[in-house]
Each structure stands twice: as structure tokens, then as C-alpha cells.
Image (cartoon, rainbow, N blue to C red):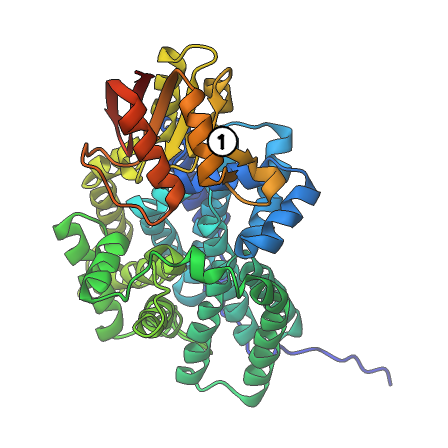
Amino acid sequence: MVTTQVKIPLRPVSLARRTPVAALLVPAVTMALLGLWDLGRRGQWGDEAATWSAARRTPGQLWDLVWHIDAAHGLYYLLIHGVLRIHADDVALRLPSVAGMTLAAALISAIGARLAGARVGLVAGMLFAVVPIVSLYAQEGRSYALVLAGAMACTYFLVRACETGEGRWWRRYALVAAVTAVLHAFSLLVLAAHAVTLLVGRAGAREWRCWGLSTGFALAAVAPVAWVARGQADEALSWMTAPGWDAVTGLVRSFAGPSGWIACAMLLLAAAALITPRRPALDSGPVSLATVALPLLAVPPALLIAVSQVHPLYDQRYVLYALPGLSLLAASGIDRLTGLVLARGAMPLAMPLAAALVVSLVLGGQLGAQRHVRSGESRLDDLRPIAEMVRAEAKPGDAVVFLAGTRRKAAIAYPKDFKGLRDVALDRSPAASGTLFGTELPPDRLKEALSKAQRIWLLDREDSDQRRVFSDPRERVKQEVLSDEFHREGVERLHGGSVHLYVHN
């Protein structure tokens, strides 16, 4: 007799969890369109200029940079280096972030669909896509959108691994967790959120063992980066302070939306997902939407804020990947509430109509915020108008000087606008010095170089005319020479900085 063996899944997945392609594509396309909307409208700001400075170097120069000053972003800089070799402008600089958020929207939909049905997944992806802070980071040449996508991929693989018990999902989980951790070490906090998911879901020994091995693999991958970056963090994070209650409220406003009534509605819908009865046909399994989404939303910010009371490390962009937890809960809340109505004989289209209404209100009620994040005023500075002003007014042979904090960012982001000008304070270029913005002459040589100039364009971060006290002797020399030997003929104040023309007496 010939017998055949039938492999039975450890944990069967219901037919309701099959994800229609439309549930993934609609949020992804929506996110892509929002990400591409006015992508090149504003100029680079300071952090993007740092990316531009690093990514435009040769691999050898990039290695020198990350070894000395910016190891935490080395993998991201290498990725952008490849992108900018194909085409180099502000749009190309930001396209990877648009792609990251687009992928994240699809993954959020997939997570929601696996845990609570295709409708919840579709709505969760849409709610995520239309939040203004998502567009803010989709249109920024930094790593945070890609980190968010990586965190959502890990979360999706965790859900699949818990559903099926198959090792392939854990292997993918470990690999993506490691790559995401190298992109940004704080993404490891998402693994802590997943530990809470396993704890609340009463995971078995096998799940805990796989999670532990995956976490260990990610820690091992990021350890060399952390070792190199250990001496760089003090300078890079010196601007941070211990977060207070305003950090919590600011995070809520960013995640739920700057509009008060929309934020309240999102929070109420999320609460409804936690307190209303579950729909067994669609919201059951080894893990539930609530046990995945709530830890994702709460654990990473709570941990980072708690640690930052002792050693300040918190910034909301470092835990941006917690935002999808709110989108998933709000989508589930819509489904739960309409399910209660459906139980009383309402129309079958109640859920789609309610979801479409909520998404439309969230997007329409925040169009002003969406426009704002695409303007230069949404960041600390906008370097393009500053560079364009210098190009329009400066004469060949004029000198240019960067005062306090401007660190020649405008000239690095838009070098063509500074062509023909002499950076008289520069000692070694950014690439030659292994720094992001170069090093300057010692005070005695700087004073001599400034005194020889006839016209100096001074770029300052401040709008104030008041004389400031600097700890750096180079900055004091700049002030003293300009005050004693030059007179100011004009000033133009722009967003995030000012441009002054000084002429030798």
C-alpha cells in the first residue's frame, strides 16, 4: 500500500486573511502620489545638506567620513551615493524616501489585512498615507522613511511567522531587522514592541526562541557600527535635552494630525478598537491587531522617552515607525463600530462608506498642513533661496564667510551658486578633512585672510543684529574683523538665515 503524507500547517490561516491586491495597491499608489506632489518645490535644508555632502563622495572618502564622524548613517549615505551617481538633484535625493513610505503603506495594509481583513488593511494603509508627517519624511533626504518601511516589514514577517510557524518568516524577520538596525540603531526598539506582542499573545517557547535569535542577529549586525559611533554620539546629539510632557503631546499631534478635531477622532477610533467586541471571523488568530498595533504605537516612544530622562536621545523622528500602530487601531475601530451597526441590520456598505468618509475628512481637513510640509518653512531652513540670493548679487572674486552653525551648508548643497567666490575661512574641504562641512583656518591665519578681502558675503544662521558671544575663537575673529575693518552695506533675511554684504573700509 502506498501512503501519502499531507503536511498540515501548524496554525491554519483563515480564508478571510487572503489579501486582495487592491488593498495593497490603493494605499501604495496614494502614498506615492502624495510623496511625489511638489517633491522638488523647496530646497535642501541642513540635514539634507549633510546627506548631500556625504553621498557625493567617492566610496573611499565616504569610508573616511563614517569612520571619523557619522558612522550611524553610513549605510544610508552609501545607498544615496548610488542613487546620486545616476542623477543628482533635490528630487533624486528624496526619491528613496518616497519609495520607503510607499512600501510602508503597502506593508501596513498587508498587516491589517492579515490580522483583521482586507477592508481594515485598506483603511489602515490609507489613514497612514494621508497623515501630514508621513509626507514630511517622505519628502526628506534622510533615512527615516526607509527605517519605517523596514520596521513594517519586520512586523509583517512577525505576523506571518506567528500564523504559520514557518522558519522562513523568522529568517526574513532577522535579516530585515539587521539591515534596518544598521540604517538606524533606534529601530531596534521595534523588536521590543514585538516582544510585548509575543508576551500578551502568550507565545510558545519556539516563538520566543526565534525572536531571541533574530534579535541577537540584529544586535550583532549593528554592533560594529555602534562601536565606531560610540565616540561620535556626544557631539552629534549634544543639542538634545530631556523630553517632558510636551514631547508626548507633540508626538500625539504629529501622529494623529495637527488638527485638533481630527486628532481626537483618530484617538477615539483607536480606543474603540480596544474596547469594542472583536469580530471572531476576521480578528482572531495567534496574534491580534490590538496586540500588534498597541505595543508598536506605545513601546518604542515610551522606552526612548524614559531612557532620555537620564541620557537625552529622544526625537520623534527616531520613533516614526510607531505611527502605523495608530493607523491600524483607527482602521480597526471603524470596522468594529460599523460592525455593531451591521448587527442591527444596517446596509452592508456601512464599513466602506464610513471608512471613505473618515479618510476623506482626514485628508481634506489637513490639506493646509500637507501644503505646509512641502514648503521651505516646514524645516529649520531652506538653503536654495539663500544660495540663489548669493548668486544673484555676488561678483566674481568676492569672499564668502559662514558664521556659526551655517557651516557652509548652502555652498555644499548648491555649489554652482557659489562659483567664483572665495571661501576664505576654509582650511580643508569636507572630503579632504573627513568631515561633513570642512574645517576652518586657525584664528591667526583666519584674521589675515579676512583682512585681505575687499567684499565679504557673510551667511549667518541668526536674523538678529545683536553681537553674540561665541566659545569658538574662530567665530570671535570673524566678528571682530568684520566689525573693525568692514562696514555692512546690506542684509537680506531669509527663512533660516540671513545674507550680509560687508565692504572693507
Q: Mark 1 sits on what residue?
A: 412
Mark 1, Cα crowd under 10 Å, few <14 / some 14-19 / many 20+, is many
In this rendering, position of residue 95 left or right of residue 277: right
Task: Say whether residue 402 is left or right of residue 415.
Answer: left
Taking depth in this image into account, of 481 and 396 the one nearest to the observer is 481
x%, y% of residue 225?
60, 62
Q: Who is closer to the viewer here, 377 or 432?
A: 432
As drawn, 482 above or below 381: above
Task: Give the quadrant of the C terminus.
Answer: top left
Q: Quadrant of the N terminus?
A: bottom right
Q: Quadrant of residue 265?
A: bottom left
Residue that protrudes farthest toward the right in the picture? 1
Element type at mark 1: helix
- Residue at the extreme left: 261
Q: Quadrant of residue 332?
A: bottom left
Residue positioned 44% across, 57% down in the render: 235
The answer to whether 201 appears left or right of 430 in the picture is left
Q: Is residue 389 visible?
A: yes
In this view, 419 is above or below 152: above
Residue 200 rendering spot, x and y as whole percentages:
39, 83
Q: Is residue 233 above or below residue 20?
A: below
Towards the viewer: 253 or 505: 505
* Residue 348 visible at all: no
Q: Residue at x 28, y 55 (%)?
A: 255
Looking at the picture, how far across and down is residue 347, in whole percent?
22, 54
Q: Residue at x 46, y 45 (%)?
A: 142
Quarter where residue 394 is shown: top left
